[in-house]
Image (cartoon, rainbow, N blue to C red):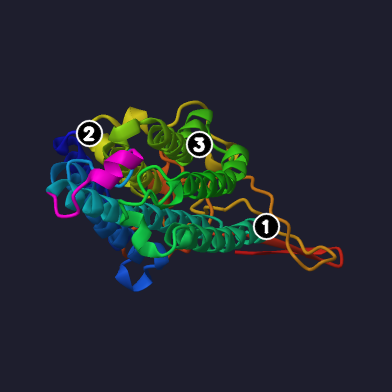
Amino acid sequence: MADGEAFALLAIGLTLIFLRVWARWASVGPSKWQLDDYLMPMTGVMFTLETVAAYLVGALFQGLTNSYMTDEQRESLDPYSREYSNRQWGSKIQVIGWSFYACILWMLKVCVAVFYGRLTNGLVDFTFRVRIAYVLLGVTYVFVALSLLLGCQPLTKYWQIYPDPGNLCQPTNSRLSVLVVVIPNILTDCYLLSIPMPLLWMANISFRHKLTLMVLFSGAVFVMVAGIIRAAVILEAGPEGAVSGSQWACRETFVSIVVSNLPIVHPYLRKFATKFGLGIAFTKTGASAPSHQHRSKTLSTGFKSSRNKSGYPPCTPQSTAWGSDENILVPHTDDRHLRLPENSRDIVVLKEVTITTNGQARSEG
């Protein structure tokens, strides 16, 4: 990766994070920010540090680490030479890079989980899935972080040149580091991907709108592919592994930032595109669902709950919106029905719940 590419990805990623912060500021205001609204700017700072670290590996330390050396080369290398110093500092940067890389990925996963929590607010079954995601992310990150820091002991062996510290203590191509990151990374992405897909599939919206949103939410697939490529490159790159691994770490981080922020900034991108006559890429075609063809000013979530024996309301998605501040599933072509004049006293029903008790049903809005 040329230096220009690395810093171009950084600039685009930071711009997208800024747009996300602005979108949340405009939609709910800072007083109603949630955990992901604070974590996302922190990932921008971490991404900047990761990019600088990747730059230093090649530009300042010539891509040298304590890896890819024979025993003869290790023994004959002068401890006071520039190469010896470069290899030690290159190895230290690799350890720091692994830490930044894992921290950024898991922070972004938490942001996604919090966003899904808003998206499924009030839906018992899906709220439980989001809580499982929090636990899964916490446990896996502790496992990954401890494996990276404690996999080689003492820690100074991570930049030891002679004698050979072994593969576990060679941060450039340590199989332990590669596997303990890529496997939990893929597993957690798969689980997070499974949360919104059932809702999108059953949502009562046009096929084009449904397909657009499913592609939007399935961006984690690209993150998984980037992670697998990075792991393969590290294990097969040879002496260029330090530079190649750092390159792919920045690329995967960039893709993760894009995927994590697109669902939130998507409505604003749609409005911007529509303003310049490019809204066809964001609008839906075909007949709208019957629930959106009425002229009422009522927007129902379509998630009806009835008390069962366990006392918990089962959730059956039937319409196009649920409790998210971003209103991703609000129909695009009928937005005018959602706006009221500033002096209007009309009441807009945002949620509708039907509760059945002893054979009698009553509706709450």
Identify the residue at horizontal 25%, vertical 40% (top origin): 272
Identify the residue at horizontal 24%, vertical 30% (top origin): 277
Q: Quadrant of residue 230?
A: top left
Q: Secondary structure at mark 3?
A: helix
At label 1, counting other C-alpha atoms closer than 10 Å, the crowd grade (few under 14, some 14-19, many 20 or more) is: some
Q: Nearer the viewer, mark 1 or mark 2?
A: 2
Label 3 to label 1: alpha-carbon separation: 20 Å
Under mark 2, the amino acid is Met
Highlighted magenta segment, given as a residue range: 69-81
Q: Is residue 139 magenta?
A: no
Residue that carries the numbered disc 1 in the rendered image: 125
User: In the rendered image, which quarter contains the N terminus?
Assistant: top left
Which numbered marker is on residue 147? none
Under mark 3, the amino acid is Met
Under mark 1, the amino acid is Asp
Q: Is residue 363 visible?
A: yes
Residue that carries the numbered disc 3 in the rendered image: 214
Q: Secondary structure at mark 2?
A: loop
